[in-house]
Image (cartoon, grey):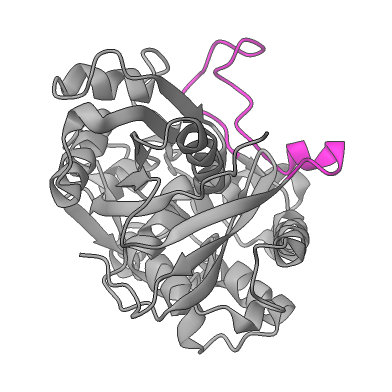
Amino acid sequence: MTAAVIDPYLVAIATEVPPHQYSTEELLAASHGHLSDKLGAMLGSLGIEQRHSVLANYPDVLFGGAEPQLDIAAADLAVRAARKCLAKADVSPDSIGLVLGVSSTPGRLLPSLVCDIFARMPELPRTAPNLSIEYMGCSAMAKAVETARWFLTCNPEKRVLVCFMEAITPLSPVLPGFYSHFSEVGPQQRQGTVDVMHGFLFADAAVAMVFGAEGDGPSFGPVANLTNELASDAELGTVPDGGSDIPVVYGRRIYTLSPDVTPRGAHYASETVRMTLEDDSCELSKPADASALLLHTGSMRIVDALCAEFGVDKDSEAVASSYRVLRDHGNTLGCSVPLMVAEPVHRPAGQGLLVAFGLSFSCGAFTMTIPEGGWNPQ
């Protein structure tokens, strides 16, 4: 007889952001003489007002060629979130049966983020299984929820610690030249505009969660997954150098981005939401019925497109977290959806929908069931 799959309950959640915060106005001021008027206007309309960076001199690094001053190591950012989360959960570290380290921007390629977390947290059981979920981009929370479901189904007496961490700003290309809007450049100059987008769009954060087989918080799952429906989708966005195919990196790593990301992302989100709604465990008939609709914050344009796709008013409280996290944190890859979950707002009872999608190309949609009386992250 097959055991019923256990949807993980959120026991506790905690966030940690670097101390240095930079507004879009600051970055635009630092970029004076580097951007066309049209590109500057586009960057000012991304829906991002501020972002955090592990660098103490991020604007000077971007536009002045300054030597990066690292204020906090990437793994330390994750550890701070993890320790805050364990304290909130008020559980013994010995109850942690699985530790997941989730990142697309680890501080170093080896050891992995999860092993660096163990090295910095002697309170974790040395014998606890651990797993790195790396380079899954913005779809990472869906992968973490799916893994927690499998583990807790087999080990319901244990708990799962998940540490999401992204430190993207140190990887942003320096911008010494003059750059123009996509509509003002030819194909050969497009990469320069993508490099500027990288510097303004992405930011750094860490979020930790403790999941259990039961609890007072929301439960998550099941997850509907879709990965590289078309083989060409794998090329929508790449970091081609630094791996075994191109092991030598000259300067900063290259980050490519296709103009098809927005329409393909909307397609992936729509398909995975459709699959979620068709699951027997889903109580919703359409996305607009969700008590909360947490959409990965790729950019305001993407969130607007998804609201239109799902028939949801973009001023609705159900999607407010998506816009607020984008506004206050920028695009933090795998941390974006977890930051929405952690927002200190009251979530009404009912079922919500979460959609995490991004480069590689992969997407996961899943339900978040809020208990009677609602839930407010503490």
Q: Looking at the picture, tell me which residue is in the foreground, 354 or 189.
A: 354
Q: Main secondary structure of the magenta part?
A: loop
Q: Image check: 289 left or right of 338?
A: right
Whether 190 is drawn above or below 244: the answer is: below
Q: In the rendered structure, does residue 231 fall within the stretch colored magenta?
A: yes
Count up the numbered dots. Answer: 0
At x 54%, y 65%, the residue is: 299
Viewer can see residue 277: yes
Q: How far across and down, in percent of the image, does residue 16 sit?
A: 22, 49
Q: Looking at the picture, tell me which residue is in the foreground, 145 or 334.
A: 145
Q: Looking at the picture, tell me which residue is in the foreground, 85 or 305.
A: 85
Q: How far across and down, in percent of the image, does residue 76 sit?
A: 20, 32
Viewer can see residue 48: no
Q: How far across and down, in percent of the image, does residue 294 sit?
A: 51, 68
Whether 281 is drawn above or below 371: the answer is: above
Q: Which residues are magenta?
A: 226-255
Rendered image quadrant of residue 91: top left
Q: Image check: 73 left or right of 123?
A: right
Rendered image quadrant of residue 287: bottom right
At x 65%, y 67%, the residue is: 282
Whether 64 is drawn above or below 320: the answer is: above
Q: How far across and down, in percent of the image, does residue 109 sit?
A: 42, 17
Rendered image quadrant of residue 137: top right
At x 44%, y 79%, the residue is: 320
Q: In the rendered structure, does residue 244 fall within the stretch colored magenta?
A: yes
At x 62%, y 49%, the residue is: 358
